Amino acid sequence: MNKIEHIGIAVKDLNSSIDIYQKLLNTDCYKTEQVASEFVNTAFFKTGENKVELLQATAPDSAIAKFIEKKGEGIHHIAFLVDDILAEMERLHKEGFVLLSDSPKKGADNKMVCFVHPKDTNGVLIEICQEIKWI
């Protein structure tokens, strides 16, 4: 794992949260994106080398909606950038971690992603992600 790629924050209202984080971080949101397969709208901010991702559910039975219902708004996950997501998934599986998917999925911000079950990581949902490289 190379570095923390971003911190994901679950929010109820993306537009009002964008306003809050633009003021807080003193920077503009550089990207919004819908990830239809995950039933989520996202907004990204950069501050230095760090990123913050806001996540709003687009369906009442989505993972983000369930998270907010159970825990309220707040930190949803920490994402780590990797060079080879398949190799990292294999390594984590061999180490005994439970992955939430058998293969990487297309995520936001031009990334392939996979999540590690929070029961294996002291209650923290961990995302591993790899930049999609276009030839």
Image (cartoon, grey):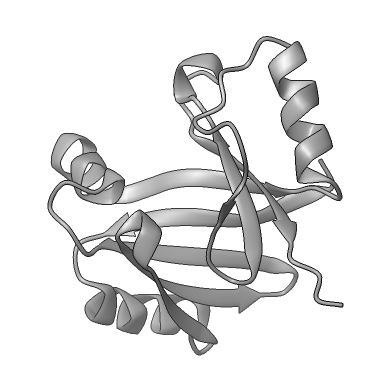
Asked if residue 37 is positioned above or below residue 27 in the image, the reply reads above
Q: Is residue 47 left or right of residue 130?
A: left
Q: Percent x, y for residue 96?
A: 67, 9
**Going 72% across and 74% down the picture, which residue do you hit?**
48
Q: Percent x, y for residue 18?
A: 35, 79
Q: Is residue 70 left or right of residue 53?
A: left
In depth, the one of 134 and 13 nearer the eye is 134
**Going 46% across and 16% down the picture, which residue do you hit?**
119
Please give the count of numbered marks on the rendered protein. Answer: 0
Q: Percent x, y for residue 44?
A: 51, 74
In depth, the one of 25 and 124 nearer the eye is 124
Asked if residue 119 is positioned above or below residue 52 in the image, the reply reads above
In depth, the one of 67 and 73 nearer the eye is 67
Q: Percent x, y for residue 45?
A: 54, 76
Quadrant in which residue 63 is drawn: top left
Asked if residue 32 is positioned above or below residue 124 in the image, the reply reads below
Q: Is residue 42 left or right of residue 66?
A: right
Q: Is residue 97 left or right of residue 63?
A: right
**Going 81% across and 40% down the picture, which residue do you hit?**
1
For the C terminus, the quadrant is: bottom right
**Going 40% across and 65% down the picture, which residue do you hit?**
54
Direction top: furthest residue: 96
